[in-house]
Amino acid sequence: MFTHKPDYEVVLDRFEALWHAEVVDRALFGLSLPQPPEKRQAVPTKHFASHRERWLDTEYLVERTVANMNNRIFLADSLPIVFPNLGPDVFAACYGCELEYGESTTWSHPILKDLSEESLAGLAFDTNSFAFRKLEEMTHALLEVGKGHFIVGYTDIHPGGDAIAAFRHPQELLLDTIDNPEGIKKLLDQVTDDFFRFYEYFHELLSNAGMPSASWLPAIGKGRFHIPSNDFSCMISDQMFEELFIPGIIRECRHMDHCIYHLDGPQALRYLDRLLEIPEIQAIQWVPGAGRDGWRRSMPVYQHIQSKGKAFLVDPVHAQDLDEFFTHLAPEGVWISAVTGVTTRAEADAVAAKIASWTRRQG
């Protein structure tokens, strides 16, 4: 189906099993290699007057994407996924938030002075906004060159609390949680409805082009795949998270077929058990934060998730550490983001055989 991933159907079956914390033939793992030097093509370079100009150059995006795809070999369960990207606040930009463009990310300026009825009445999701139309343009351009070759997914979407924090500014939203929680609830209902409009538009566009549901995490699923998150939750109490934001997260997840929750930072870890109680959240991506990375440090978290019958994404594991890694977990629900320390196809095949053997031993 995709020239960059001839065994795509096999990998899709493995992901479908992962969402149920099961395995087909072995646990999932990512592994890709660069093409041999003689097969690599030059990645285009171009001078830009500003970061904004570079971010918005669709032709440049397409040229670099094609070159980067052609320069990698996607082995094991690695997938050739690309997506249009204008940064994490692009959903808020569809309401009129102006984006600032940096070297590696973008951020938005707040537009909502308060949560009064008057202010909320003036806030509207706009499919004719510059951000929405640019995402549409980029998606069409990627589909044109990628169809039959690589997977095109939808952009990184942050609805819910993160969108409202972008509208208001996190410090102002913190005050709102005390001064106007009902206003937050009302706005969350509106934002979630708008998120479904956003999601469905791009889901239909991509699925009609023969694409599986995919996004910024290198995963796929049949039906609707989503990566819910709420980075703002790190700043509030457990009670406020439950009362204000959990209902919206549940709504998001019930709209989907497959969900992996993006749990970012040590302050968010206290919500893990509550999130694991939500049936529609099938997997967790735990991001421990700067200076805390490494699978060994996160092993208690992985073990706890597995004890609840859910799947999870694991930090990269070096090939020489696999035997040690196997002693801590069962293979069901395990998705190793990448096995590192591999430089040849023969070594990659040996890793696949080792993980398959671990799976059979555990079975």
Image (spheres, helix red, strand yellow):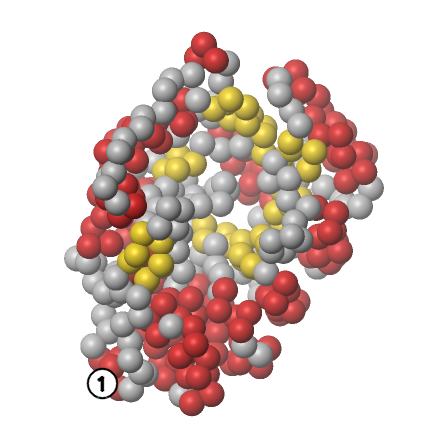
Instruction: Kindly tell me whether residue 195 is visible in this rendering.
Output: yes
Residue under the point 63% across and 55% down: 288
Instruction: Kindly tell me whether residue 306 is visible in this rendering.
Output: no
Residue under the point 45% across and 32% down: 80
Give x and y (percent) for residue 17. 60, 43
Above or below, comparing residue 106 to residue 351 in the picture: below
Above or below, comparing residue 293 to residue 350 in the picture: below
224 or 151: nearer the viewer: 151
Give x and y (percent) for residue 333. 66, 46
Residue reaching furthest bottom?
179
Residue under the point 50% across and 42% down: 219
101 or 143: nearer the viewer: 101
**In the rendered image, which residue does mark 1 sit on?**
118
Give the residue type at disc 1: Glu
Give x and y (percent) for residue 185. 40, 80
Based on the displayed image, in which of its 4 quarters is residue 269 positioned? bottom right
56 or 248: nearer the viewer: 56
